Structure formats: C-alpha cells, structure tokens
C-alpha cells in the first residue's frame, strides 16, 4: 500500500475504545438473559455471571497481550497468521467472519422485532431496513461521529438499566426478601447448575474482542487496546453481577415464572405497565449503539482481509478518502440486513456463535505459542501466561460443545467453504497465502526472532 493511499485515521482514545467494547457487548443484555441464567442456576445468577466474568477474563488477557504485540485491525485473523501459520490465520479469519458478518444482521433483526412490537404500524421488514440504513449512515460519516453517537447511546442504555434497578430497590423496601445471601448461594444451588448457567452467561461478553479491530484507529494502541479489552470485561462483569443480584432479590418469591419474558414482567411488577413500555423504548434506542459498534468492527475486519489480498482488494481493501472509513464494507454489511427478512431470531443467532468461540480458542493458542517460543525469557511470567491460555482455550472449547446442532452444522459448513476458497486462492496449495500487511507500528517482525521484553509484559496488565 503506497504512502498516498487512504488509511484508517488514528483518533480514538482509551475511553472511546472501552465505550466501543461495552456497546458491542450491550450492558442491557443482562436484562434479556437474566431469566434464563437464573432458572439454570436455581436463583444464583450473580454467582454464575461472576464465574462467566472470570472465564472470559482469561481469553481477554490473551486478546490483550496479542493486541499489544500486533496492533492491527485484523484481530484474531492477524494473531493466528503471525504465530500459527498463514493458512490457519486465513481459516480463523474466515470463521470469525461468520460471527462478524452476520452479527449485525442478528442485532438489526432483534432491534426490529422489539420496535415492531412497540410500533406495529411499520412492518418488520421496514424496521429492519430503517435500522440498517441508520447504522450504516452513522458509520459512513467517520469514526469520530461513530464514537460520539456510540457514547451517547451507551449512556442511554446504561441509564435505562439503572432506572429499572432503582425501581427494584424501591420495590424491595416494601417487599423485603427472605434472604440477602440466597442470590449468591442457596439450598438449591449446585456447582453443576452454576457452571451451566455461567456457560450461558458467557454469551453476554461476546464483543470484547472487537475492541482489537480498532487498533489502527486508536491512539497509542499498544497500551490502550489491551487496557480497553481488560477494562471492558471487568466493567461489564461488575455491572452484570450487581444488576442480576438486585433482580434475583425481586424475583425470589415474586411469582415471576417465565424466564424469557422476565425483563418485561419484572418491569411491570416494580413500576407498572406504562413504565415497562417506556423502559422498552429506552432499551431499544440504547441498543442502537450495539448495532453501530458491531457493524464498525465487521467492516474493519473485512478491510484488513481485503488489504492482505485474501478477499478482493479493490472492494474490501478500499478506504474512503474523506471519511477514512471502509465505505464499501459498511455498505456490504448493511446489505446483509436483507438476509434477515425471512429469518427468525433463533435461526439467525445460530449463524454467529461457532465463529466467535473458535476464534477465542485460536487466540488462546496464539498466547500459548508465543510464550512457548519465548520460554527462555522470565520463565515464571511465561508459565503464567501459558496457564492462562490453556484455561481460556479449555473454557472456549467447552462453550463450543454447548452450541446447538444447527449452529455447529452451519459453522462446519462455513469452514468447508473457507477451505474451498483457500484452495482456489493458493491454486491447490501450490502458492502461498497472500502476504500479510502488518501495521508498521507492530512490535514483532515476522522475519526477526521473537523476543520477549519484560516491560512490554507488564504494560499489558497494568
């Protein structure tokens, strides 16, 4: 890429990167998932979500370390290419596309279902098109505008959840629970039940990895991206645990039974139907931030793969001269909204989880590989990171085994398509995978020996 070619603009701060990750995860997801997690864990959702936080933190540390070493927008795709092999890297990038490319479609569909239920005058397909067009327009303007819209809507979403918590606290002042410790552990609690609920709770954290796709648009990315990844997991985890604790206190003895409608029925219980309807609108508006973040991350992964030549460069490697955004990729992801028109939420959700957890596993293996190669440098630190990688990979493989049959079949089918494309790209594996265009600020040069630097390790987790 020549020096005169447009490139991503480096304008984001640490706060912006954290806000991006939190928006992608969507703090209000705790309200949607609470009923299911509570049911599986027998009323100990906070404990299950705390376990989810610790499990995802292991993978988060792997991503943080890799983002420190390779500050590129390519995320797991880049890490796997550099540390495993170009072919494995391609397949990891291809598989994670299943997550990134179709997740915007799923979020637009969910958003539109809620809006259609609230405002049935506009058909579902109309809301899908409106949501996709609005999100694409925000992202097309540029990363600065995207950041501002993202922060405002994130605040709206968080405030909506906090208002519900406040109503719950008021409700509890007149309806004191039998025990304040039951949400942590009670007579029905089992380690197996809490572990199973924690596996479900892990889905609430999907998205922290997308922060690494902002590495080429964030100031001082080797410090700020790793910190943003860790901070977003810790902040989201603390928020999920605290909110679910209050909701468990309300739920205990309240007679609320349907886990899927728990958010709405609890809102009606503590604040009345009018409040529940207003809360729904606020949460839907706030969730628009997640749509913006998800589409932005998808477009940047496609950009790096296009820049490397593993996808057609003229289209996927294009950057708008004025906006400094991957405009063609944003339009392409916006067009995926059309796929959602005939789908249900259940079917659409089966598209994404396989790619996410397989990519998580690959990044943990990358961490193990890096520290095995550098085992002569500060052995205690190396062993610690290797153990973190093993723990994170084990968790992610377990989550892979918990996916539905549909999700697994779709994931395997997509992977087979990737192998076919790779075969074509390399002329039957007779040619190498197109060369990697690594960001010039990266610490590690593929042609040079990999050397572990003590202060680099420390700065990742400071």
Image (tube, rainbow, N blue to C red):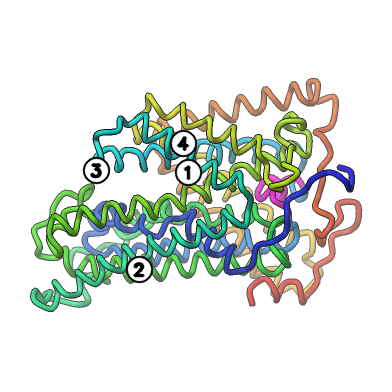
- Is mark 4 in CB contact (under 8 Å) with mark 2? no
For residue 138, above or below residue 11:
above
Where on the picture, by quarter, is residue 443?
Answer: bottom right
Residue beneath disc 2: 241
Q: Quadrant of the N terminus?
A: top right
Q: Earlier in the sequence, mark 2 or mark 1?
A: 2
Rendering quarter of residue 462:
bottom right
Relative vertical location of residue 426 with respect to residue 459 in this rendering, above or below: above
Q: Is residue 72 above or below residue 240?
A: above
Question: Could you say whether the residue bearing mark 3 is in a helix, strand or loop?
Answer: helix
Report, in whole angstroms, how far the alpha carbon at label 1 lies from the one at label 4. 21 Å
> In the image, what residue occupies the spot 81% across and 43% down?
436
Q: Position of residue 341 (x, y in %)?
A: 39, 27
1 and 4 marks in contact (CB < 8 Å): no
Q: x, y percentage for residue 254?
A: 10, 62
Q: Nearer the viewer, mark 1 or mark 4?
A: 4
- Residue depicted at 68% across the width and 42% down the height: 326
Q: Is residue 2 left or right of residue 28?
A: right
Q: Which residue is mark 1?
A: 400
Closer to the camera, 62 or 129? 129
Task: Kindly report the distance in space between the C-alpha atoms of the residues bearing marks 3 and 1.
Answer: 35 Å
- The residue singled out by tag 3 in the image is 118
């Amino acid at each position: 890429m020549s020096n005169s070619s447009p490139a991503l603009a480096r304008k984001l701060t640490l706060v912006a990167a954290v806000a991006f990750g939190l928006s992608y995860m969507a703090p209000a997801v705790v309200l949607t998932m609470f009923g299911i997690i509570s049911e599986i864990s027998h009323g100990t959702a906070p404990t299950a979500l705390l376990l989810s936080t610790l499990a995802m933190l292991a993978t988060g540390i792997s991503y943080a370390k890799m983002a420190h070493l390779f500050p590129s927008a390519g995320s797991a795709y880049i890490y796997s290419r550099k540390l495993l092999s170009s072919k494995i890297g391609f397949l990891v990038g291809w598989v994670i596309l299943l997550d990134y490319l179709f997740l915007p479609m799923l979020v637009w569909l969910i958003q539109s279902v809620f809006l259609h239920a609230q405002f049935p005058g506009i058909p579902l397909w109309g809301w899908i098109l409106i949501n996709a067009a609005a999100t694409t327009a925000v992202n097309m303007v540029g990363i600065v505008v995207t950041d501002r819209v993202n922060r405002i809507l994130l605040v709206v979403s968080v405030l909506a959840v906090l208002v519900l918590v406040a109503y719950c606290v008021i409700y509890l002042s007149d309806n004191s629970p039998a025990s304040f410790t039951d949400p942590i552990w009670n007579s029905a609690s089992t380690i197996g039940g809490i572990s199973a609920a924690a596996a479900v709770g892990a889905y609430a954290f999907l998205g922290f990895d997308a922060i690494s796709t902002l590495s080429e648009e964030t100031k001082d990315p080797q410090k700020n991206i790793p910190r943003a990844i860790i901070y977003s997991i810790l902040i989201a985890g603390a928020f999920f645990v605290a909110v679910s604790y209050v909701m468990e206190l309300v739920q205990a003895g309240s007679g609320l039974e349907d886990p899927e409608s728990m958010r709405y029925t609890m809102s009606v219980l503590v604040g009345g139907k009018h409040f529940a309807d207003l809360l729904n609108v606020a949460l839907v508006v706030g969730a628009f931030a997640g749509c913006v973040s998800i589409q932005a991350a998808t477009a940047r992964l496609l950009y790096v793969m296009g820049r490397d030549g593993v996808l057609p460069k003229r289209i996927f490697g294009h950057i708008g001269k004025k906006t400094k955004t991957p405009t063609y990729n944003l339009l392409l992801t916006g067009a995926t909204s059309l796929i959602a028109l005939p789908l249900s939420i259940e079917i659409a959700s089966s598209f994404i989880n396989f790619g996410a957890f397989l990519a998580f596993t690959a990044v943990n293996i990358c961490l193990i590989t890096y520290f095995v190669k550098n085992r002569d440098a500060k052995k205690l630190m190396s062993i610690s990171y290797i153990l973190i990688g093993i723990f994170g990979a084990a968790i992610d493989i377990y989550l892979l085994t918990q996916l539905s049959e549909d999700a697994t079949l779709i994931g395997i089918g997509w992977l087979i398509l990737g192998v076919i494309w790779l075969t074509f790209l390399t002329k039957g594996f007779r040619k190498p995978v197109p060369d990697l265009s690594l960001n010039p600020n990266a610490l590690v040069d593929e042609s040079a020996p990999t050397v572990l630097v003590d202060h680099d390790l420390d700065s990742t987790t400071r």
